[in-house]
Amino acid sequence: MRYTVVLTARFPDVARALLAPHFDLIEHPTEPERSEEDVITILADADAAITLLSDPITRRVLESNPNLRIVSNFAVGTNNIDVDAARELGITVTNTPGVLTEATADLTMALLLAVTRRVVEGDREVRETGRSPWEPLKLLGASLQGKRLGILGMGRIGSAVATRARAFGMDVLGVRRGEPLDELLATSDILSIHAPLTRETHHIIDAAALARMKRDAYLVNTARGPLVDEDALCDALDRGQLRGAALDVYEHEPAVNPRLLAMPNVVVVPHIGSATEEARNAMARIAATNVLLFLHGQEPLHRV
């Protein structure tokens, strides 16, 4: 019997190369917005599935297919999956940790530099005017040397960002899960968020937290959108409490708050933290190998 593996998106070729010799593959085009009903339909024939973070793998989805044995998430996070329901139903859940660290840390620094040095504003001005005049007071930004970078979440990615920031001459203050945020919020010139999304961390940066930050501080989020109350962030930016923000993730992805898009001091990119060829190929290799090992009766690389 050949198992059927459903790929809910177009993944790097390495996934197909690993799985096709052993299993029947059903590949679907990438869709950033799938409903629960959509996922039930495309997983109907699956013994195994490789899924995106945007695929809602709810209890109802998991219960809809009694043959589903493993869900291999193409991500580190699993907040799109009802892991407790999967465990109850005997369905294995896996993820792809470790290989996103350097790419996401690099993007964090890119966003940090872009917002503090007003790179996107400058790019927009040159494109719109077709000119690049030098002026003494044009687009003055902020230097990183000697500034404090506060890191909320000192896991793999947060630690990698800290290493990069120190090379820029920054003072780094990091906090781990459960530690108080008072000093972090009050003293950071730039706050970079790298915490996982849980019930406890949802809106961990809310109106009260933003009000405790230094005036003219910056906020960078490359972790998960719902960690930040976006309406409160927009309010803080509107009243000048914060000097700017740079975001790779959004509270209601794939939708982006239109208030953010109207602000010139907000840098926005479309969830590309792991978007390097090296990282995405490694993610595909791990996601496929998790399925390959499991369906061959072996322990997957990264069981959640």
Image: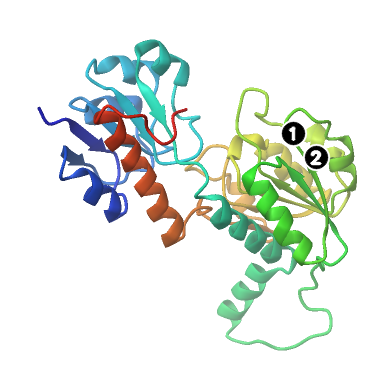
Q: In the rendered image, which quarter is residue 299 located in?
A: top left
Whole-percent x, y for residue 58 in the image? 40, 21
Which quarter of the rendering shows the N terminus? Answer: top left
In-front residue for pair 235/92: 92
Density class for disc 2 (Cα within 10 Å; few <14, some 14-19, many ≥20) is: many
Residue 245 in view of the camera: no
Could you tell whether 22 is left or right of 37 in the image? left
* Residue at image location 78% in from the left, 61% down from the top: 166
**Residue drawn 46% across the image and 30% down it:** 80
Which of these two is toward me, 23 or 50? Answer: 23
The numbered dot on residue 19 is none
Q: Position of residue 78 (x, y in %)?
A: 48, 31
- Label 1: element kind: loop
What label does residue 206 carry, if any?
1
Residue 70 falls left or right of residue 172 = left
On screen, residue 131 above or below 243: below
Q: Position of residue 208 (x, y in %)?
A: 82, 32
Provide residue 102's location: percent of width, then percent of height.
57, 56
Determine the image quadrant of residue 235: top right
Q: Amino acid at mark 2?
A: Leu
- The answer to whether mark 1 and mark 2 are in CB contact below 8 A is yes
How many numbered marks, from 0 up? 2
Tell me the number on the disc at residue 210: 2
Please, what is the three-letter code of the amino acid marked with disc 1?
A: Asp
Label 1 environment density (alpha carbons within 10 Å; few <14, some 14–19, many ≥20): some
- Residue located at (29% from left, 39% from top): 8
Mark 2: secondary structure = helix
Q: Is residue 130 visible?
A: yes
